[in-house]
Amino acid sequence: MCGVNEREAEWVTFIFGDEQPARLDKYLVTCLPELSRSRIQNLIKDGQVAVNTLAPHKAGQMLEKGATVQVNIPPPQPSQLIPEAIPLDILFENNDLMVVNKPAGMVVHPAAGHSSGTLVHAALAHSPEMEGIGGEQRPGVVHRLDKNTSGLILLAKNDLTHRFLQDQFRTRKIQKTYLALVDGHPPTPSGRIEAPVGRDTRSRNKMAVVTSEKGRQAVSEYRTLASYPAHTLLEVHPITGRTHQIRLHLAYLGCPVTGDTVYGHRQASFPIKRHFLHAARLQVQLRGETAPRTFEAPLPPELQNIIDILNLGVKK
């Protein structure tokens, strides 16, 4: 139970009134639902939380009935990112979030070698209020798509929505559907791939299928939509969300994503400057709504053109 006693300057005071002891960080999550647990843990670490006027020794410190908890919530730090007026294909937008159809070739957030021209730079120009939401270098980012993967991506516009969406990803309530054209054919028309993913010890920029002790659980499901002489069009559902998971899992299956020169063939089987992987459908619960929403993004022209060529060959 969160009893707000008073607010002094930027400090908010709560009185812990439960009979059963509770962890400090978990208690504050219930008192401050607009903040994520990781944000609260960072506030504790940075000395922005006091228990009975003393700094807690850890985020998991147990609270007893009657404990006074004070929290100083600093405003979002001004970002050093410079907004860039890059056109965005926004499929849906409200006060909480944006659903963007990201083109291939655009990096989601600033990283080594990509200090400008990212989706975040474009989003900040469109919605300046996103500044500081979820982190200075990744404002609004809830999940990611690889640079050369196109399709649907969510951007949160406030801390409460950022946490709301993160919780849905964490509990695997958000359903994601990808379209992937692969070289060759999977061993079965549909299936489930369970193969742990971890960092490739030979190349730190790549991921690899590893033992369960060295990686994290990764699960993908797929089904065949169309079969061609040398290719297969698949619908893929990632159950978990590991880095490069779909590309790695399909390569592990023996049918790498067409155009993926990292995990597949060095020479692409079609003359495209990207891999054929597209986030086509996303089902998510929006704040204040009872039924989940489904958003869809059609294949971009360069990928649809390949399917048209393949279909033409089949008809012949």
Image (spheres, rainbow, N blue to C red):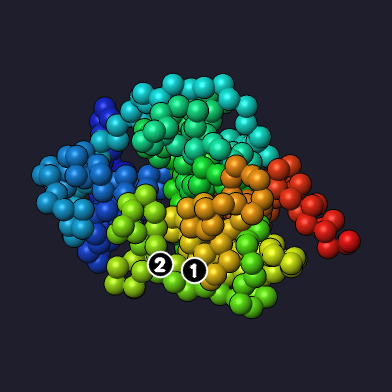
Q: Is residue 103 visible?
A: yes
Q: Nearer the viewer, residue 189 or 18?
A: 189
Q: Position of residue 176 (x, y in %)?
A: 59, 58
How many angstroms separate mark 1 from mark 2 (CA)?
8 Å
Q: Going by the image, does 267 lie left or right of 69? A: right
Residue topped by disc 1: 252
Question: Which amino acid, mark 2?
Answer: Val
Query: What residue is rendered at 71% in x and 43% in y?
Result: 302
The vertical placement of 182 against 68, above or below, is below
Q: In the image, is residue 83 above or below residue 201?
A: above
Q: Which residue is found at the position 69% from the left and 65% from the top?
A: 230
The residue depicted at 64 percent of the width and 78 percent of the height is: 188
Q: Which mark is residue 169?
A: none
Q: Position of residue 304 (x, y in %)?
A: 75, 48
Query: Tag 1: residue type?
Result: Tyr
Query: Quick one: SS at disc 1?
Result: helix
Asked which quadrant contains residue 209, the reply is bottom left
* Residue sticking out furthest to the right: 316
Q: Quadrant of the C terminus?
A: bottom right
* Mark 1 vs 2: CB contact within 8 A: yes
Give the structural element (helix, strand or loop) at label 2: strand
- Whether residue 292 is situated above or below residue 148 in the rendered picture: below
**Of the image marks 1 and 2, the number of the one nearer the N terminus:** 2
Percent coordinates x, y for residue 295 in the rendering: 68, 50
On the image, which quarter does residue 35 sit in? top left
Q: Is residue 193 left or right of residue 314?
A: left
Q: What residue is drawn where x is 29% and y is 59%?
A: 201
The circle drawn on residue 209 is: 2
Residue 165 appears in view: no
Quick one: label 1, few (<14), some, or many (20+) residues within 10 Å? some
Taking 85 as reference, is 227 left or right? right
Quadrant (top left, top right, bottom left, bottom right) of the N terminus: bottom left
